[in-house]
Image (cartoon, rainbow, N blue to C red):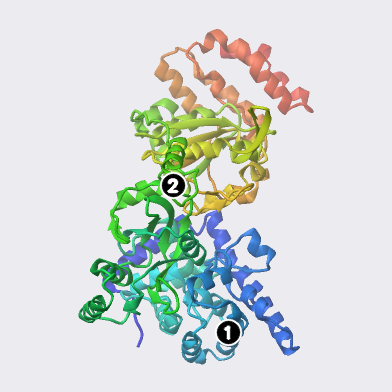
Amino acid sequence: MTHAVESERQSQFDALLAEFLQSYVPTPVGQEHRQAYAVMRATAQAAFTALQGRAAAGEEIADAVLWALLPYTDSAQHRAQGAWVHLAPAITGDLRTWHEAAGWTQPHAWPAVAQAIWRFVQRCVQDPAQLADACAEFAARPDTKGFQTGMLSPILNALRPDDFALIHAKSRAALGYFMGQPVSPALVDYPAANALLHDLVQGQPALQRAARQAALRPGDLFDMFSHWLSAIRRFAFRPVRYWRMVVDEDPGLWAEWREGQVVALGWDELGDVSGLGRAEFEQRRDSLLAQFPERTKAGAQAVWRFARHLGEGDRVLVVDRAGLVLGVGTVAGDYYYVPELELGHRRPVLWDDLTPRQDAPGPRQLLAEIDRASFARAAQAPVMAAPSAPGPPARVAEARAAYAAPPARPQPEFDLAACAAATGLDEGLLARWAQAIERKGQAILYGPPGTGKTYVALRLAQHLAGGDGFVEVVQFHPAYTYEDFVQGIRPQAQAGGLAYTMTPGRFVEFCRQAVGRSGRCVLVIDEINRANLAQVFGELMYLLEYREASVVLAGDATRFAIPANVRILGTMNTADRSLALVDHALRRRFAFLALYPDLDLLRRYHARQATGFDMEPLAALLARINAAIGDRNYALGITYFLRPDLAAHLAEIWQTEIEPYLEEIFFDQPEQIEPFRWEAVAEDLLR
């Protein structure tokens, strides 16, 4: 039986697909995404062929299977280990630590697990008709519980893309939404999900045409579409719910949750509740309460909510008994029960932020649903300097005081109309720029000197930073370093000499001030390309692209995340260094907003200011000069002439600013400058 997109969602699918094809696929990021499928498949196919040769020669391949056939995030550690880096990574850290902490796999079982993965992949690749039986047998093993569809479908898709669909959290959400039925992440249900995705693709002629035009398989284009819907457009497939969980005071328990990428609840006497109806659950609960008087009905109800009400994609805030925030995560899969572990009721979680933060007042229950605003306030609470476990009250109070945000001063409203009036730029253009900044989180205004990049950046920042937000400015230069911007060891004077301590840099301090504010906080980086950007940003390169993630900063074990309300605006002088020289990895993390000389803006300024200066001779001259320069990255800008008393100062401006600039541009062609010297142009400009 084939399935089709639900009729009431077909028009929505068509509209979203058209938007995706126009707004994402043609962009540099979209093209990089498109090309990645071929790269990933080539890497996987080469690794699989090599493993076949090694296995035939009788070599041990268990470790190689775990690294080469499973999808990992792109990190320095994973690349050093030779891991298979994938667009849809299921493994973000250490696979063994994760599965052992979650209770899925015992340390001694890894060779057997690797052999099971190898047999599973070989069986499916050799005969795709064996998929259902292979999935059922693999899932039935006691040591492979954590290997769901998102872990194993990538390698099947890489080796036989026409037979096996790439199914992971994003594509499952999109597939389930448009086909009107839930798509399970369990490996045993992968055959059904595989068939469902093939049905969707076959029933969408527009998707197939677009795939041919993009030189992609239709399934790959749907995978790109799913990523765009979830990660970029933030499409709401289902209402997200927000939860607050309290972890016990044992620090080892939180370490287990963190490393195992899980959250967990006790009341283990209830056993696995996944197959119970409500009446059956309550009957079992009441019977157990009579046997274990120390247990409570409220605790049992928490288990029921944990198993039945939490959904994939829901957000989880973890706090300790004192209410200090330990971590923020996203539910990544179904409920499961591990009978041999304490707190055996479990949910897989992807941690978005593991930065200890100030206390978050809220319900005292082990598990409670909270509203979105409460969740956001807690997730962005000021960073804690103290360890995450609660300590003496004086230490906690000291840490809170040290990391409290400075008093917020409401910013006056500066809407787009005011921004347009201040800059002279079109309001529609500014609206598109503001939207680009919101979409990416950071942008660079680039153009030749004299185009007002810094001024426009400050006015845009003023527009973005309403309410209790704020704007700060920093200027980069060739000596600017990671230690200046992020953090580094600095000497501190103290009694008896110097102490060398880890000191936060300008950006980390800026983010600490931004935490807890509701308004946007904008950092303007003037002359951003004058520093070695890859060196200055360091691991922030990752955070600029994955804004909800956190990383460990160089030099210590501190985890750092960019607050959601932080925006970055850079300015770049293209005459100082060509845009083409900027690191490509950084370029794709910023929106680039071009600002070139606009003679109409110059005319409008003098008309609005009623200066009486005749702009046409000057405009014509600037057009001739820029035509002679022949490169818009070095064009002569207009800001030299944006002043109401221009007539009185034009000679001085021309001789002390314009001529030296032209001498630099035409240093090897001095004859080019002569028609543009003040003596040659003064009569026309001042008539």
Residue with the most extreme top position:
648
Q: Position of residue 381 (x, y in %)?
A: 40, 44
- The residue pinned by badge 2 equals 357
The foreground one among 398 and 448 is 398
Q: Is residue 437 above or below residue 59?
A: above
1 vs 2, front mark = 2
The residue at 59%/41% (across/down) is 486
Query: Relative to 419, is 277 above or below?
Result: below
Q: Amino acid at mark 2?
A: Arg
Give coordinates of residue 91: x percent, y percent.
54, 68
Could you tell me residue 499's position as x and y percent? Answer: 66, 34
Mark sitting earlier along the chain (1/2): 1
x, y percent for residue 362: 30, 51
- Neighbours of disc 1 within 10 Å: few (<14), some (14-19), many (20+): many
Q: Is residue 631 visible?
A: no
The residue where tag 1 is placed is 121
Name the foreground residue: 660 vs 166.
166
Label drawn at residue 543: none
